[in-house]
Amino acid sequence: MDKYFSTDYAEARSKFLAAAASANVPLWQFEHPLTGPNGEAIGTDIVWLGARNARNIVVAGSATHGVEGFCGSGCQTGFLTENWESRLDAGTALLLVHANNPHGFAHQRRVNEDNIDLNRNFIDFEAGPPDSPGYAELHSALVPEAWDGPARKAADAAIQSYKAREGLPAFQQVTSRGQYTFPDGLFYGGTGPSWSRRTIERFAREHLAQAERIAVVDFHTGLGPRGYGEIIGRGGPGDPQYERTVAWYGPGVKSAAVGNSASVRLSGTIDFGYRRACPDAEQTAITLEFGTLPLEEVHEAIRADNWLYAKGGADASSHFKAIKAQTRAAFYGEDSQWKADIWARGQEIVEQALAGVSV
């Protein structure tokens, strides 16, 4: 099972493509205009398992948040290697989207090449971005001018004061729901569709037009108990999509709308891309979120990575190696037990998605 997981993006892509070639399945490759840290080509690779005219489609995606991609990539390679195509009925297909955000995966960042959080980028920009109340008050503290000395000390004090006054849940909501005003800030959603969004929506329009039911399983890491895969649904009781989600996956389904999830309410998540591209299909989307480290450590890793590229001079910074290691640890549990937990839960959830979408 460890063999499905990788040490970097280049290895993950190589394993996925090799497994796809061995399985002799349809493959589409979308090369990104930029490169990886060693000048290597990067891109989003999509494999189709099952009948091309299937009306019921499960989309299992990885690396929406770049560095989080080790988790989903390992499962996707496992699905190919263990011939999951043989499990599909004639009306059902499994689509494996490897590296929604290949630049972030390759450079081990959550965000893309423009500091965009891809899972905040799928909003309707023509209608205007949603408000992000409270973020402006915290921006200068979240992105201090220096990572050491008085500036950092003052920034940390401001954050702690906010948490003490408003509480940690309020801090998480304000900082991570998505903001569209500060391009150098945390959880920035952009000013228009990113390369990744355009690629995903174009593929969906061209190849999923026949779909009647689409289930989206988007693999993520960083929230919740270590190694456990929390199912985060959309909406709440009474919402048809939420009710389907509970019927498919059981009473353990969580939702930010209900208030029982490790995540907060978000704007512009990736499933809206499939909804926009395939408006006539019934959609049931979940985030499958695997825990790594405690929440505050994960948030501090996100803040550190953001500072490194916004203010720190990135690879020229004396903090580069430490922050890159901090970021990786926050989103990739590299021990064998963590990988075993991810593989077991990933199989369970995708199997349930296939069963649900086929009903």
Image: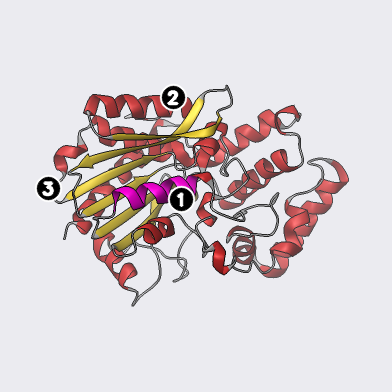
Toward the viewer: 209 or 41? Answer: 209
Q: Position of residue 277 (x, y in %)?
A: 38, 57
Q: Is residue 221 visible?
A: no
Where on the picture, by quarter, is residue 170? bottom right
Q: Which residues are magenta?
A: 196-208
Where on the picture, by quarter, is residue 182? bottom right
Magenta-colored segment: predominant secondary structure = helix
Assess whether residue 199 is covered by the magenta stretch: yes
Q: CA distance from mark 2 to mark 3?
A: 33 Å
Query: Residue sitting at 57 percent across and 52 percent down?
Result: 295
Mark nearer the N terminus (1 vs 2): 2
Toward the viewer: 208 or 69? Answer: 208
Amino acid type at circle 1 is Pro
Amino acid type at circle 2 is Glu
- Determine which residue is flagged by label 3: 90
Mark nearer the N terminus (1 vs 3): 3
- Determine which residue is flagged by label 2: 11
SS at circle 2: helix
The residue sitting at the left extreme is: 90
User: Which image quarter is the C terminus in?
Assistant: bottom left
SS at circle 3: loop
Q: Position of residue 54 (x, y in %)?
A: 19, 50
Closer to the eye: label 2 or 3 = 3
Where on the picture, by quarter, is residue 212? bottom left
- Determine which residue is flagged by label 1: 225
